[in-house]
Every structure is written in structure tokens, then in C-alpha cells.
Image: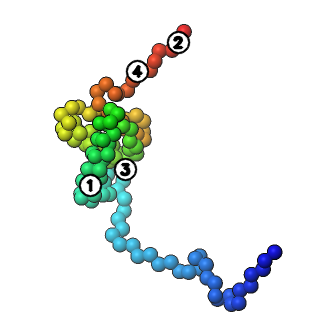
Amino acid sequence: MTTVTIASPDAVQTNCERPVIRDLYNVQVQPEEGGSTPLTVEEEQRARAVLFSDLGNIVAERGWVRFPAYSPEERRRLVDVANRLSAHWGQQVLIEAEDQCAMRLYLPGYGSQPASPLLP
């Protein structure tokens, strides 16, 4: 068994003993559900451009993509991306809500498949 002896109790100071000072700049209250986006106009444009590129590549490869959308603003973003992809490709990109947390962008023919009939 090893014993460690500290010469001075002031020599060791843990993180919980040190004061932590954090300066908060540009802190804003988040809007209510369904309110405007907390992103700036420039950030919103960049977010939509990234979604356009990334989701567009996946839809082009396999015909569909599922993406999380937890708020109305995220859903509006995805609808805008689907409309922009449709205009860019000259082919309609459809969008539907799969559930409360996900949206699906797809090309015609890759949409929701009807449930298979039950076997007798």
C-alpha cells in the first residue's frame, strides 16, 4: 500500500475550489415555440445551404433521406430545402413528416411504401 503525504494543504487546489468566472456576451432569451429562429439571417442562410448540399447529395444517391426536425422552424427549413432542390434539379422533391421528430425528403417513386398485406 502506498501512502502519499502532502507537505502543505495550500499546495493542492481542486477545480471545485477555484472560482470560475464566465463572461456572457450577447445573451438573448429564446423565443417561444413557433417563434422566430434564434439564428441570425446569415447563420440561417448558411444552415440552409449546408442542408441543401448534404441532403441533396444523399437524395441524389439513394432517392430519399430521413432527417430529424424537432421544432417548427427546423421543419420549415427542410421544406425550403426540398423546394430549392426541386427548382435546382427540375424534378419534384417531395417531403413528408414521418413522425414528430423526423422528416423525409424523397424523389417520386421512393416515397412511403404501403404496408404489405397480412398473410392468411
SS for dot 3: loop
Residue pointed to by mark 1? 46
Residue pointed to by mark 3? 33
SS for dot 4: loop
Work out whether mark 1 precedes mark 2 in sequence or the reverse, and give the earlier one: 1
- The residue type indicated by label 2 comes to Leu
Q: Quadrant of the N terminus?
A: bottom right
Labels 4, 3: front one: 4
Q: Position of residue 66 (x, y in %)?
A: 38, 38
Residue pointed to by mark 4? 114
Work out whether mark 4 precedes mark 2 in sequence or the reverse, and give the earlier one: 4
Farthest right residue in view = 1
Q: Position of residue 24 (x, y in %)?
A: 39, 73
Work out whether mark 3 precedes mark 2 in sequence or the reverse, and give the earlier one: 3
Work out whether mark 1 precedes mark 3 in sequence or the reverse, and give the earlier one: 3
- The residue type indicated by label 3 comes to Glu
Left or right of 88 in this view: 15:
right
Q: Residue at x 19, y 39 (%)?
A: 88
User: In terms of depth relative to the viewer, which is nearer, 48 or 90?
Assistant: 90
Q: Residue at x 58, y 76 (%)?
A: 15
Q: Position of residue 114 (x, y in %)?
A: 40, 21
Specify few, some or many for label 4: CA neighbours under 10 Å numbering under 14, 14-19, or 20 or more: few
Residue pointed to by mark 2? 119
- Spatial CA span between label 4 and label 3: 33 Å
Work out whether mark 4 precedes mark 3 in sequence or the reverse, and give the earlier one: 3
Q: Residue at x 34, y 47 (%)?
A: 74
- Spatial CA span between label 1 and label 3: 22 Å
Indicate the quadrant where residue 10 lies: bottom right
Left or right of 105 in this view: 13:
right
User: In terms of depth relative to the viewer, which is nearer, 4 or 27?
Assistant: 4
Image coloring type: rainbow
